[in-house]
Image (cartoon, rainbow, N blue to C red):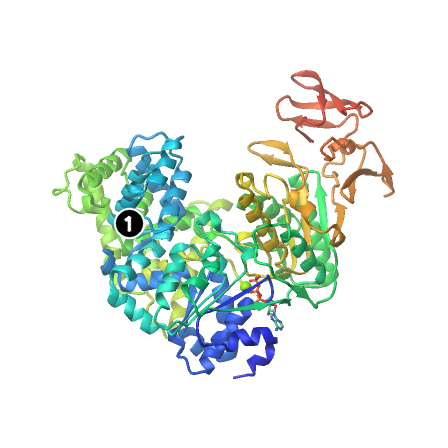
Amino acid sequence: MKDYLSELNTQQRDAVVYTDGPQLVIAGAGSGKTRVLTYKIVHLLSQGYEPWRILALTFTNKAAKEMRERVEAVVGTDNASKIWMGTFHSIFSRILRTHADRIGYDRNFTIYDASDSKSLIKSIIREMDLDEKVYKPSVVISAISWAKNALISPERYAMNRDIMEADKRAQRTLIYDIYSRYVNRCKVAGAMDFDDLLYYTNILLHENTDVLHHYQGFFKYVLIDEYQDTNFAQHLIATKLCAESNKLCVVGDDAQSIYSFRGANIHNILTLKSTYPTLKTFKLEQNYRSTKNIIHAANSLIAKNKEQIPKHIFSENELGAKLEVTDTYSDYEEAVVVAGQISRMHMLKHDSFDDYAILYRTNNQSRRMEEALRNRNIPYRIWGGVAFYQRKEVKDAIAYFRLAINPNDDEALRRVINFPARGIGDTTMSKLTAAAMDAHVSIWEVISFPDRYPSGIGTAALRKLAEFKKLIEGFNQLNNESNAEQLASKIINDTRLMSLYMSDTTPENVSKRENIQELLSGVHDFVSDRFEQGNSDTGMASYLSDISLATDQDSNDMSAERVTLMTVHASKGLEFKNVFIVGVEEELFPSLMSCDTPQQIEEERRLLYVAITRAKEACLISYAKSRFKNGQTMPTRASRFLGDIDPGCLHLSSGTMINTTPSINPVGNYWAHNTNRQNYVYKTSDNGHKQHTNSAVAADGQTHIVSELSEGIRIRHGRFGTGTLVKIHSNEPEPSITVQFDLTGTKKLLLKFARFNIL
Ligand code: ATP
Ligand code: MG
């Protein structure tokens, strides 16, 4: 084993070699917390700890994978593969499967993803005849998720006066009822959602002392990364598991706590000392990841938060470039500018596209970015749930896989009972559902025993149901005898899922076939990986378990170099040479949904702190002055957080260049130059020289887009439609324009309020 301790600084080394008892490493971004955890595992192995007695928990699969690779590099694949290393969800689903019978589940339970949960909640709301406007599925789901993460059962939910009062005020007095039905329906369907994996682990350990004692004796060391984002359920599991060994090592950074909306509780870190009186705290201070400018910018931003543990963090790396803050005219243009910047930097720096990441606040910002990258032929990959496994054809195939291991899985059954079409219509489905609900059994049960559960379905439909039953039973049978790969090919073949898309060669069909092919090669890789690791569990249940927890993984080919696109949340713990943070605007970052309380604003600020500290060398921030939202273009403003960062480490530039349709816009290219928070607007003439033109700065300090305007250009207004700009009134106290609209006549619009797009 190589001399790993020499690769650590003194503070890190102290934290690694300390093995006397519970320990907390609290330190800022990039200071080597994850490195300490990784090296600590290596250290434990060198001290004679058996690998299978070490439990290491991370937040994302990507983090677990990276940690495993780093450990492998030092101790070899054999040892590394035996460590219990993974996300909370993947490790605990493994434990739950082993003891499923103790909590009333079959070991082949299905894991419902977010869309399964939502569709089940919706159908319950409908059955109960509730108003979807009052009982919004997304609100109900978060209420249930919150309850589960706080380990509150439906019964306790109904008894808790505070919650009931809150529900009453919101006129949602029946949430507990929906919650209770939801839990029962999941049970009948042999399914667990993500929160259940933690909820039931707690129940398992709480109600079965023999199981608890087994794991308490089994795991000799528990290590947890990103502890600031654990919720109550996770905190409790961790505490229970190391109650006997007392060997716990958690690392975290309160300034990066960004999951409170999922019940994460920073107090889990703060109260560790009272749970473990002998807790020893370690601090790390040197950042190895980023340039001085990046660290300084991040520190100055987070200093604006009131709630935080004081920390000193410094970098001995070089000063580096200032953070580039670019504004653009629209979100469309922002994407074009960012793609252009990546392309230029890539050419100048001769680095790999893997060194680039584009981070955004919300998933739906990715589409415009994708378009712009595609237009420039820049390869990219998206990390995050919605990618591969959410595509229709992939979900259909997976629904059959799920039925093959668990035919009681109602959501999977609903999805494919009539796909490919086999004449089982909505009426039949309603009758089946009603009969299943009345008898508190799954739909499959009703189909299997039509005499026992009369549903009023006619003989023709019954015959079709019997055929469907036979098909699924065949898969069930095969599941017992074969590995995931054999079963998957049989299913794709027998259901004709692939041949469905053979009929013509439209690009959509070709891509659907490719996706199914890709899914099959994924199953193949799974089986061969397991085989190579000497793991004989190559069945469909394990495969499904793997992929349903692979929310932050992409099945795309990982070998080619690509720009990474992801939400800031998903970027936690990762690092990239060049980071682009896009859409840094009010109502987006901070999000409109998180602007109500100072606590929410602080969490959004921490989120931007996380984003900035992902960067090693270059950090480029951008915002657009108008954004297409809810079907119209709305004016937007730079995020308040930009004003929190020390201006000394920022370089404010402008990327605006409305030249997308030069033939219509006769005046040529424009760009706004932005210095020291005052907005000066320039127009670039054809020879490239800047000329100062009319700038309209409103009372709130925001530039309006008068610079991009000229008489004769065509615009589209949100309400009045398309028209021609006939006059600019820039010398009036409130700059305005007169527009001759094609259908609605001539109108004078105050620029401050006008919402329009230049065509
Ligand atoms: P985050 O808060 O973002 O999760 P972290 O504290 O976990 O960050 P790491 O990811 O462990 O930090 O380390 C940041 C970078 O610094 C990594 O590339 C790591 O390899 C490097 N690094 C950490 N410590 C050292 C060291 N002593 N010598 C050289 N490089 C180091
Ligand atoms: Mg880390």
What residue is drawn where x is 68% and y is 19%? 742
| Mark 1, secondary structure of its residue | loop
Quarter of the displayed picture in which ligand 1 can be seen? bottom right
Residue 452 lies in what quarter of the image? top left
What residue is drawn where x is 35% and y is 68%? 243
What residue is drawn where x is 33% and y is 54%? 199
119 to the left or right of 107: right
61 to the left or right of 215: right
Residue at mark 1: 409
291 to the left or right of 149: right
Residue 181 lies in what quarter of the image? top left
Q: Nearer the viewer, residue 137 or 14?
A: 14
Q: Could you say where residue 246 lies in the image, as x and y percent from the top left?
A: 39, 71
What residue is drawn where x is 27% and y is 66%? 211
Q: How many marks?
A: 1
Q: Is mark 1 within 8 Å of ligand 2?
A: no
Q: Residues within 10 Å of mark 1 (few under 14, many from 20)?
A: many
628 to the left or right of 144: right
Q: Could you say where residue 364 lies in the image, as x and y percent from the top left?
A: 54, 43
Q: Nearer the viewer, residue 146 or 728?
A: 146
- Considering only vertical position in the picture, is 504 above or below 616? above
On the question of residue 204 being in view, the answer is yes
Residue most extreme to the top: 745
Three-letter amino acid code of the residue under disc 1? Asp
Q: Could you say where residue 255 lies in the image, as x and y percent from the top left?
A: 57, 56
Q: Could you say where residue 593 lies in the image, as x and y percent from the top left?
A: 52, 39
Q: Quadrant of the C terminus?
A: top right
